[in-house]
Image: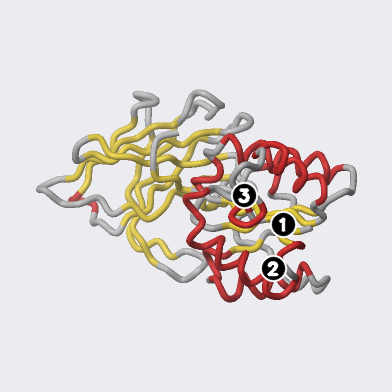
Amino acid sequence: MIFLSHNHKDKVIVEQIAIRLRDIFGEEKVFYDSWSMQPGDGIIDKMNDGLSECKLFLFFVSKNSLQSNMVKLEWQNAVIKATKGETKIIPVKLDDCLMPAILLQSLYIDLFGNGLEVALRQIVDVVSGRNTFQKGVQEFSNLRAYTYNEGDNVIIECHAEHYLEPISSFIFLVTNNQDELAFNCRSSAMVRTGFNENLKLNNGKIFNGQMMAIEKATVPGFPFIIYIEPKHGIQVNLVGVMHEKKMHEWGMIPLVHGKK
């Protein structure tokens, strides 16, 4: 049994995959709520039956599904079964959400990054025992940058999600010129700063970047916070955030649009 765990807001995408799997493997082999549960059925009983029988758990990971308590119960139940060797979990990433840390040890199908047809082919390969899909691009990161607006200002909160980060040194990449923006730190009055023009990243792209650093560590619950104030009505064009992992070694950290 192939169990499709998803949020109803993602049905427009998930149903395309469900129909393709039904056409190939048969409707009785695919647990998809639209045909596996009928009016009058007990929802919890039916879901429990599907989870009990499933050998392959497709978890469609999105911002919608990660906020759903029902989906959370489904995939956490599947994790328990997976630890007993009773099922296999295949995450399918639908948007630019951040994968739950517990699933990062698993290969996942990146529908968001590779498109529907590639993801469909990979899912069919997995179900058929031809495990040929590639690892997604996201790797584990203790740091995440959350960005949102306060009026015209852009706020960036760099959070240590799990443990202390001893180096609080960041570069905020923008396409703006130095005279278009003012960078301010809310985490400390003692800040080292420096604007760097034409920073060339490993992928060959070139941006400007504002370096900001404080002597304190970044610890869970106490983020490194800056706000960017645009001048003369200019729009802030934030590209990404880099963290100094060790001296002169920088790496990008995940950028989340919205408050933590």
Quadrant location of the N terminus? bottom right
State how many labels appear: 3
Q: Is residue 125 left or right of residue 219?
A: right
Residue 251 can be seen in this image: yes
At a point 32% along the width and 59% down the height, the residue shown is 197
The residue beneath circle 3 is 38
Say what secondary structure mark 3 lies in. loop
Tell me if label 1 and label 2 are in contact, CB under 8 Å.
Answer: yes
Q: Residues within 10 Å of mark 2 (few under 14, many from 20)?
A: many
Locate residue 23, reporting x and y percent: 67, 74
At a point 47% along the width and 50% down the height, the residue shown is 9
Locate residue 33, reporting x and y percent: 62, 52
Which circle marks residue 200 in the picture?
none
Q: Is residue 200 above or below residue 248?
A: below
**Along the viewing direction, whichever of 210 and 78 lies nearer the viewer:** 78
The residue beneath circle 2 is 123
